[in-house]
Amino acid sequence: MKAAFITQTGSPEVIQVGELPMPRPQKKEALIRVSAVATNPIDTYFRSGLVPMPAPFPYVIGCDFVGVIEELGEDSENLTIGQRVWGSNQGMLGRQGTFAEFICVNQDWIYPAPEGVEDIQIVAASLTAITAHLGLFQFGDLQEEDTVFINGGTGGVGSMAVQIAKAKGARVITTVGSAEKAKIAEELGADMVLNYKTDDLSVRIKEFTAGKGVQVWYETHREQDFGRIIDLMSPRGRVIVMAGRQSKPIIPIGPFYVKCLSLHGFAMFNCTPMEQWICAEEINDLLSEQKLKALIGLQLPLEQAALAHKVQETGTLPDGKSLFGKVVLTI
């Protein structure tokens, strides 16, 4: 079968596209014919060796997939041959990845694909939507009519978080860096869109919340300003962080504990199959109801997996423009 894989960590140039042996489904696994995959920042961390992971070489890259079940291993439950499915969390913790014509996936990480939704939409939403949902609900305990601030409302996770929070009934504040992105954030459902380059975020957020603060702060950026965050939180507010491996911010402890705030950090791939299954069920509903849409910036064939990683890593398209949306590959 054709696959994109590495035999060592390094730059995007270490990615090879060639033939690998067909995998065979083991107990509680399904053999899936893959139709589409997507790239994520975490993929580049694994490939480069920045984040060490158990990697049996040759190591197929990629976390996300959409495809059709071709064969079932022993004791596979709630799955059928010919079923269209999707998933994430592959290509990590010793599991082979998804950039291949065929993959074997444990049933715990397989979700039924919603009817009437394109493969590229499902796969572009998969990891980022699960991450957004986990942060908002598993860790942020977002409630209807809460005010949530999402830093970076047109990014991969941010755009998903804006839509999911709005579908929950929350009031959504988000940031962008241009008028073009502001328009998109508004179309995604944000109630207040702020340009972090020109707007005084503290003044505008206090005005929007009538000085009461936000209940959930979803921080997608790698550098965090906890002085401002804590000042803008409501009592008993929840702060969510999920990026910034090298970040070492100063946290003003006094106002943090006086407001009874909580700080939650998480990495999606450390969450349990059951925690992520809950996310997937609601994501399916939102996709089916057209309340969730992934932004797609570039679509490539599998043969250009190295280019996909280069674009993901640099944020720059082949024509020199900035990447805006997910990189999706079809097989």
Image (cartoon, rainbow, N blue to C red):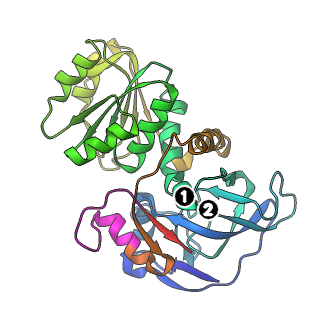
Instruction: Check the picture and name the quadrant holding the N terminus.
Output: bottom right
In contact (CB < 8 Å): disc 2 and disc 1:
yes
What residue do we see at 27% from left, 46% from top? Answer: 181
Report the number of discs.
2
What residue do we see at 32% from left, 57% from top? Answer: 324
Question: Label 2 sits on what residue type?
Answer: Val
Residue 312 inside the magenta-drawn segment? yes
Element under label 2? strand
Instruction: Check the picture and name the quadrant holding the C terminus.
Output: bottom right
User: To which residue does mark 2 refer?
Assistant: 66
Q: CA distance from mark 2 to mark 1?
A: 6 Å
User: Which circle marks residue 123 in the picture?
Assistant: 1
Q: In the rendered view, tell whether residue 183 sits above or below residue 55.
A: above
Q: Is residue 261 left or right of residue 117?
A: left
Q: Which residues are magenta?
A: 308-326
Which of the 4 quarters of the picture holds residue 298? Answer: bottom left
